[in-house]
Amino acid sequence: MIRVLYPQVFMKKFSKLEIELQEEAIQKIDLFKDKKNHNMLKVHKLHGKFSGCFGFSVNYKFRIAFRYVSKNEVLFLDIGDHDICK
């Protein structure tokens, strides 16, 4: 099981999302915590300002960017549309 760290910057941006999108993100985060679901969530390496980090889809428009702190611990960096990497 993966442990997720939620920095204040991430939580501030998350809290500004519509409630429905927050609920969808929470569902995907729960799935993300089990590595077996990473293919389904399309976990992939990111480019641009998040080069060296990873991301996964919340839906067709939104994604979460993160980096590994250790093998079983990640730090969420950002949530937003696909332009967050630009």
Image: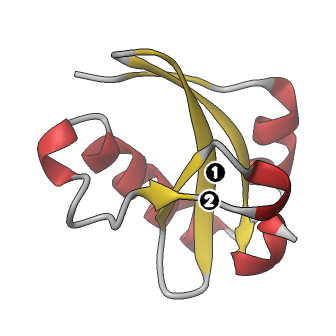
Q: Position of residue 8 (x, y in %)?
A: 84, 26
* Amino acid under disc 1: Ala
Q: Position of residue 70 (x, y in %)?
A: 45, 12
Q: Residue at x 66, y 26 (%)?
A: 6
State the residue position of label 1. 65
Count of numbered circles in the view: 2
Considering the numbered disc 2 on the image, is that residue within a helix, a strand or a loop?
Answer: loop
Q: Residue at x 45, y 50 (%)?
A: 26
Query: How is this picture coloured?
Result: secondary structure
Considering the numbered disc 1 on the image, is that residue within a helix, a strand or a loop?
Answer: strand
Q: Quadrant of the C terminus?
A: bottom right
Cβ–Cβ under 8 Å for marks 1 and 2: yes
Q: Residue furthest left?
A: 36
Residue 5 in which image quadrant = top right
Given residues 12 and 70, the one toward you in this image is 70
How far apart, in angstroms, are the residues tagged by discs 1 and 2?
Answer: 8 Å
State the residue position of label 2. 46
